[in-house]
Image: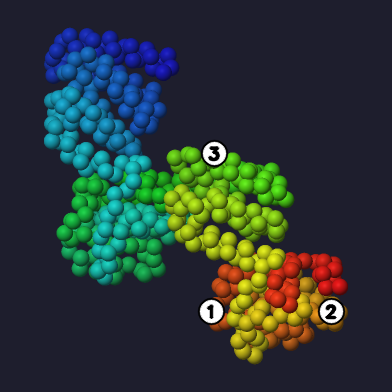
Amino acid sequence: MNIKATLLFLLLTISLGLFSQTRQISGADSLRQKVDSHISSFLSTIPIHPDSLSAASDRLIAAGESNNLSSYIAGRLFMIFKDSGIMGLESVSVYIAQKYFLSDTLTPPDGLNKSEILLFVEFNKHSLIGMDAPDLVMTTPSGIHKSLKESLGSKYTVLLFFDDQCTICKTELPELLKISKFADYEGLSVFAVFTHPDTSRLRNFIAGLPVNDIINWTFVSDPAYSTDFPRLYNVVKTPQIFLIDNSGKIRGRNLSSSSLDELLSKLYENDKEFSEQASRFAAAYIEAIDFEDSVSVKTSISSLFSNLSSASDKELYRSVFSYIYEELLYSQNEKKKEASVIVAEDFIIPYPDFWINKEYPAIWVPSMVKRTKMNQVGSLFPELKMLNTSGKRITLGKKCSKFTLIYFTDQHCATCKTYAEILKREYKNLRKKGVKIIAVNTMGTPASSDKYRIAEKIKWQILSPLENDNGSIFQLYETESVPYTLLLDRKGRIVAKNFDFATLKNIIK
C-alpha cells in the first residue's frame, strides 16, 4: 500500500474507533457521511479488480472493531459493488455477502435484509466474470435440442436473453444483428434465448428477420423453464447479454449492444496482439533449432513443451505449438517437415484436453501427419482415382514406368507454366531415360485440362480430380504450393520430391 493509502486507512481506523464508541449508527448521520467518504477515498486507491477490492473490503470490515460498525461497513461495500456499474465488480458483492451476511458472521445493517442479499447472490453467483458458463439445453423452434456448451465453437459467443415485446430488446436487437455481421468480429456467433413461453411468438419473430442476417444465430427457448436459466444467468429483465469465449469462460455480463461492441473490439485487439507475440516467439524458437539432428529437435521442443504445458491456462501452449507445427508442416525444407511429425506425435496429439477445438489434435493434425509420411522419400506413392482429358477414370500412381515424374500444377500458375516449358524442352531426353511424365491439374476438369494441353502443346497426360473431389488431392499430397513434383521408381516408391533438373538428371542417368 502506498503512503496515501496508508494515511487514509489510519484515518479511517481512527474515525471508526470513535464511531464504534457511539454505538448508534442510525443517529450519527454526519459521522456516517464521514465514514462513507473515507470508504470511497480508500477504495479509490485500490486497483479496480475483484480480487484486490475483495481483500480491501476485508480490511475495511475488520477495522470496524464492533459488529454494528463492521455490519454497516460490509453493507455499504455490498451496495457500492452491487450498483457500481462496472462489469465484474458484482463478484465482490457476492464475496462480501457469502463471507459475512449469509454465513451469519454479521447481521445485515438497517435498510438491507438477508432475503434481499440471498436473492442477489442466488441470481448472480453462477455467472460471474471468469466462471464457466452454466450449460443450457434448450429447444429450437423446429424441436431440435441445442446445448449452449456444444454451441461454443466460435471464438466468442453472445448469449442473449430476449423477449419480442420488450421495448429495450426492440432497440438492442438491430444493433446486435449489426455486430454479429461485422467482418472484424470473425468467428462470432449468437445463442439467443427467447424468454417467453409462447414459442409461436418466437417463430413469428424469426420469420420477420432477413435470413442472411441470422446465419450465425441459434434461436432457442425453454417454455417450461426447466433449465432454471433466470437464476443461473440473473434474467430478471430483458435483454440480458453475456459474452462467452470458446473455452466456455464468461468474458462479459450485463452488457448493452454498445458495451458488447466495445468489449469485443478490445478482446479481438488483445487476441491479435497475443497471437502476434506468440508467433514471433515461436518463429524465433524455430530459428534456433538444428533440424539436421532429430534428437536435438525433440530435446528442444520437449523443453518448450515442459515450460508451456505446465501453465493452468493453455492458451500460450496452443498458440505456440500450433504455429510451430504448421510452420514446419508447410515448410519447403524436408527436415522441417519431418520435425513436424515429431511435434505432432509427441506434443499435440497425446494432449487433446489442452485444446479447445478437439478436432485439431484428434482429426486434423493426425490426418496431416499421415499425409506427411505418405509424401516422404522412400514411401509408396498414395494412389488416387482421377480423370484424364477424355473423362476416363485413371488411377494415379498405379502403373509406373522405370521412372514416373508427377507434377501437380494449376493452369493459371505462372511458375507452373515455366516448369512445363522446361519439361517440354527436356521431354525427348527424359523419355529416352525411361521417364514418364504426368501432370495433375489440381483445380481443373477434363475439359479445361484438354484445352490447356492443346493451347500449351503439352505431349504428356494431364489428369484432373473427380467431380467435386478436389479436396482428396490436398488430403493426400502436399499441394498447397505448386508446382509440386515427385519422382517414382518402377515399384511406385517416391525417390525424390521438389527436385531441380540437375538432381533429376543425376538420378536417372
According to the picture, the residue beneath numbered tag 2 turns out to be 433
Earlier residue among tags 2 and 1:
2
Give residue 289's position: percent from left, percent from top: 68, 45
Amino acid at the residue labelled 2: Lys
User: What residue type is disc 1 on?
Assistant: Asn
Q: Please, which residue is most extreme toward the front here?
A: 491
Which one is in front, 12 or 390? Answer: 390
Mark 3 and mark 2: Cα distance apart in space: 54 Å
At label 3, the amino acid type is: Asn
Picture coordinates of residue 405 (x, y %)? 74, 75
Residue 120 point in image, percent of width and height: 20, 38
Residues at badges 2 and 1 in contact (C-beta under 8 Å)?
no
Q: Which residue is mark 1?
A: 468
Work out whether 53 lies above or below 62.
below
At a point 63% along the width and 67% down the height, the residue shown is 374
**Quadrant that contains the N terminus:** top left
Type of colouring: rainbow
Question: Dot 2 lies on which element?
Answer: loop
Q: x, y (%) of residue 16?
A: 24, 13
Secondary structure beneath dot 3 equals helix
Query: How dense is the environment of label 3, judged by Cα within 10 Å: few (below 14), some, or many (20 and up)?
Result: few
Q: Is residue 165 left or right of residue 91?
A: left
Q: Secondary structure at mark 1?
A: loop
Q: For mark 3, what is the residue?
A: 307
Q: Are marks 1 and 3 in contact (CB under 8 Å)?
A: no
Does residue 203 appear to the left or right of 414 in the view shown?
Answer: left
The disc at residue 94 is none
Residue at image position (58%, 44%) is: 302
Q: Is residue 418 above or below residue 71?
A: below
For the residues labelled 2 and 1, the Cα–Cα distance comes to 36 Å
Give the mark, 3 or 2, whose residue is nearer the N terminus. 3
Residue 412 visible in rendering: no
